Amino acid sequence: MIQLYWKNATGDVVGPEHGISPSDMASAMKKVAVAHEAVVEQWDAGELGYAKLPARRDYRDEVTQLAGRYRGKVTDLVVLGIGGSASGNIALQTALNPVTYNLLSDAKRPGPRLFVLDNADPTLIGDTLAMLGRRLKKTLFNVISKSGGTAETAAIFMVVREMLRKRLGEKFADNIVATTDPEGGILHDIAEADGYATLTVPGDVGGRFSVLSPVGLFSAAMCGIDIDALLAGAARMAEKLKSTPPAKNPACVLAAVKYLMYAQKGKPIHVMMPYSNRLAGLADWYKQLWAESLGKETDRGGQKVFVGPTPAKALGATDQHSQIQLYREGPNDKLIVFLEVEKHSREVRIPDVFGDVEKLAYLRKVKISKLLNVEKQATEYALAQSRRPSVTIRFEAVTPESVGEFIFLYEFTTSLAGEMLNINAYNQPAVELGKKATFALLGRDESDPMAGEIRKFAETDTEYLV
Ligand code: PA5
């Protein structure tokens, strides 16, 4: 189970200038109640694509069946995708499998090794493919692209397909699973022509909201993650967020706190700081969800608004030694969202050693989990002393259920925040220009004048070269 604790964002703790007063909260709750009603209406009308995912047995069955066909037969699984077609896969694997997963022996690993090629970086691609060596025969490639036309994914896929074709001959298609829009697109057409197994990216679910669809579920199921429990956790949270009145509804309270911090308290930067390496991938997933959904130039009426909180990530306790100096003494422009784990999936106790070293006595026989959680409390306290607001999302434990809850909580909070800012949280028009410019520079469309413009722009002006 997860819970939200927000006292340290109130004026009582960090003072009236930086903290939320009861009247601030009361007015934000009125706004969030309207947003909640609107989002629930969209949900009931079947317009909230991601909200249907926890209950989609067909997707769950499609994934389980295909994973059943490959599990035990493949040694390595390589996901090819970018943005929303990769970040959820990494987040689930990081949260729910050991950090040493890929290094475990076959007997100890509950599935194939997992690699995610989420960048068109020649060393990432080259090193990973070279490492596979003879295991290529037993490697499954899951290419994920909703549009099918994303340059980075298409490029990596072309490299992989050609390598497989050369090394495995006619049967190369057996080593590829394509996850894409079943209605059409480049990848859909190639999959059909080559004869790959396919999985669905639902048409009404955007990439960054797709982790609970076959996009995120297949690699998770292949690597032994209990996707039923993951979906059950998400479904439980979905039910709670839909039916609980705003004042007791964690998504409404989180959206209200974040909105107030952004719009009234001068805190445009929202830092997620998990005190758990396992939750670090979810913080990266949150960064994409929050940035692409809420960073918008125009509101729904077409007015220029240029809104959007800036998401950032820090890892506790590591970044106490890197970021906290800035967070405490730099500009007071951040809301910190701590993620705290009550019961970690493994325990390590510090031994009773160095009895003669007085200055280390406080650490003797202490559990490492206690050290980590105490450090979180200490940082929370130190921030509050500097009038820096924070909230905490508490995980009883990091389990498939609680991760499912967290994912749905944040997706729903994003929808509420989108309503409160009066923007479309589900498109990403600004990403499209970069994609088009890449196509133009690589000559996808010979008649496109954009390439000439960009080359002129990109020419090095030596006056500025030092
Ligand atoms: O959230 C999004 O929509 C994006 O981040 C996409 O997931 C990303 O651009 C990849 O797109 P596609 O799945 O079409 O290759």
Image (tube, grey):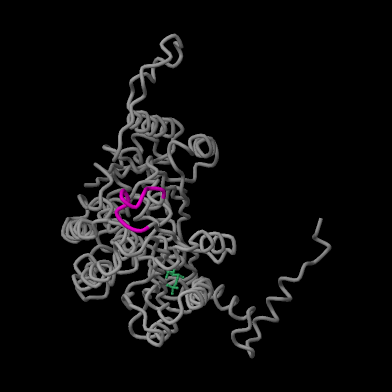
In the rendered image, residue 36, in percent from the top left (x then y), is placed at: 25, 62
Can you say whether 88 is above or below 346 in the image?
A: below
- 279 falls in the magenta region: no
Write down the quadrant of residue 385 in the picture. Answer: top left
In the rendered image, residue 56, in percent from the top left (x then y), is placed at: 20, 70
Front in this rendered view, residue 280 or 160: 160
Residue 91 in view here: yes
Can you say whether 369 is above or below 120 in the image?
A: above
Among all residues in the image, which is located at the extreme bottom?
A: 447
Q: Residue drawn 77% across and 67% down?
A: 460
Q: Main secondary structure of the magenta part?
A: loop
Q: Residue drawn 44% across and 42% down?
A: 315
Residue 423 in view here: no
Among all residues in the image, which is located at the extreme right?
A: 463
Q: Residue drawn 42% across and 45% down?
A: 335
Front in this rendered view, residue 25 or 8: 8
Q: Quadrant of the C terminus?
A: bottom right
Left or right of 170: which side holds 249?
left
In the rendered image, residue 171, in percent from the top left (x then y), is placed at: 40, 79
The mark tally for this picture is 0
Write down the quadrant of residue 203 in the picture. Answer: bottom left
Q: Quadrant of ligand 1?
A: bottom left
Can you say whether 404 is above or below 81 in the image?
A: above
- 108 falls in the magenta region: yes
The boundaries of the magenta stretch are 103-112
In the rendered image, residue 115, in percent from the top left (x then y), is placed at: 44, 59
